[in-house]
């Protein structure tokens, strides 16, 4: 098992560094500064030197990936949830850095489409494994009444999983139709946290009344 996990770590860290290949090819054509942050209208509002974006950012992503692997090691998470955690940073690296490079070259990639679609995919993946997420103090609806009651935890996370998966699908569809913004997605995420929390409290109160 340890060898498999170590191989996964090597693979995901390597994926984090993949943008260096593209950066090396495009480097001579790139302007001095590369956009790295965009407002809700998809317009660049923050820049970094191209050397930093091309050759430092991939290593920062790789470092975060190592952090994700080693720090929550003691958390009682399902194996699949740990695998998902290991792939989030590499996916961000191979999407965010190339998109910034292409935009810097004047290829007007639809940031307003890419960001919501990516958010929808992450929400969907997270929701898919929420019901399999055992009681822990790291990931999930972590309130006293779920942490102290396994039945409450399981019911809450089954409902939350359905809610997150459904929302992820809807966000992806609306993104392709260009009918949703990142601001709207942040509001959706807020409700995706609040609704299961309220639901878990209702279970707690109902159980105590009975």
Image (spheres, rainbow, N blue to C red):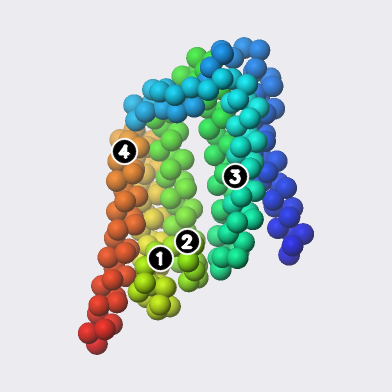
**3 vs 4, front mark:** 3
Q: Earlier in the sequence, mark 1 or mark 3?
A: 3
Residue 64 - label: 3
Q: Quadrant of the N terminus?
A: bottom right
Dot 3: what SS? helix
Q: Residues within 10 Å of mark 3 (few under 14, many from 20)?
A: some
Q: Residues within 10 Å of mark 1 (few under 14, many from 20)?
A: some
**4 vs 2, front mark:** 2
Dot 4: what SS? helix
Q: Is residue 110 visible?
A: no
Q: Quadrant of the C terminus?
A: bottom left
- Identify the residue under disc 2: 139
Q: Residues within 10 Å of mark 4 (few under 14, many from 20)?
A: few
Residue 183 - label: 4
Q: Is residue 177 above or below residue 205?
A: above
Name the one closer to the observer, 134 or 66: 66
How far apart, in angstroms, are the residues tagged by discs 1 and 2?
7 Å
How far apart, in angstroms, are the residues tagged by discs 3 and 4?
25 Å
How far apart, in angstroms, are the residues tagged by discs 3 and 2?
17 Å
Q: Earlier in the sequence, mark 4 or mark 1?
A: 1
Q: Earlier in the sequence, mark 4 or mark 2?
A: 2
Dot 2: what SS? loop
Q: Are marks 1 and 3 in contact (CB under 8 Å)?
A: no
Name the one closer to the observer, 57 or 169: 57
Q: Are marks 4 and 1 in contact (CB under 8 Å)?
A: no
How far apart, in angstroms, are the residues tagged by discs 1 and 3?
24 Å
Q: Residue at x 65, y 48 (%)?
A: 66
- In this view, the residue farthest toward the left is 209
- Identify the residue under disc 1: 142
């Amino acid at each position: 098992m340890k060898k498999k996990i170590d191989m996964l770590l090597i693979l995901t860290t390597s994926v984090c560094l993949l943008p260096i290949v593209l950066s090396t090819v495009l480097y001579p054509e790139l302007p001095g500064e590369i956009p790295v942050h965009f407002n809700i209208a998809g317009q660049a509002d923050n820049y970094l030197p191209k050397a930093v974006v091309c050759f430092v950012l991939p290593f920062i992503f790789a470092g975060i990936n190592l952090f994700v692997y080693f720090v929550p090691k003691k958390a009682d998470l399902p194996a699949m949830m740990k695998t998902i955690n290991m792939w989030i940073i590499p996916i961000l690296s191979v999407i965010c850095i190339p998109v910034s490079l292409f935009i810097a070259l004047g290829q007007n990639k639809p940031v307003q489409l890419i960001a919501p679609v990516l958010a929808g995919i992450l929400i969907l993946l997270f929701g898919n494994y929420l019901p399999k997420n055992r009681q822990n103090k790291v990931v999930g609806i972590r309130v006293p009444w779920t942490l102290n009651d396994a039945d409450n935890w399981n019911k809450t996370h089954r409902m939350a999983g359905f809610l997150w998966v459904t929302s992820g699908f809807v966000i992806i569809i609306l993104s392709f139709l260009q009918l949703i913004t990142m601001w709207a997605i942040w509001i959706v995420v807020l409700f995706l946290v609040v609704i299961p929390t309220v639901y878990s409290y209702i279970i707690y109160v109902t159980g105590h009344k009975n």
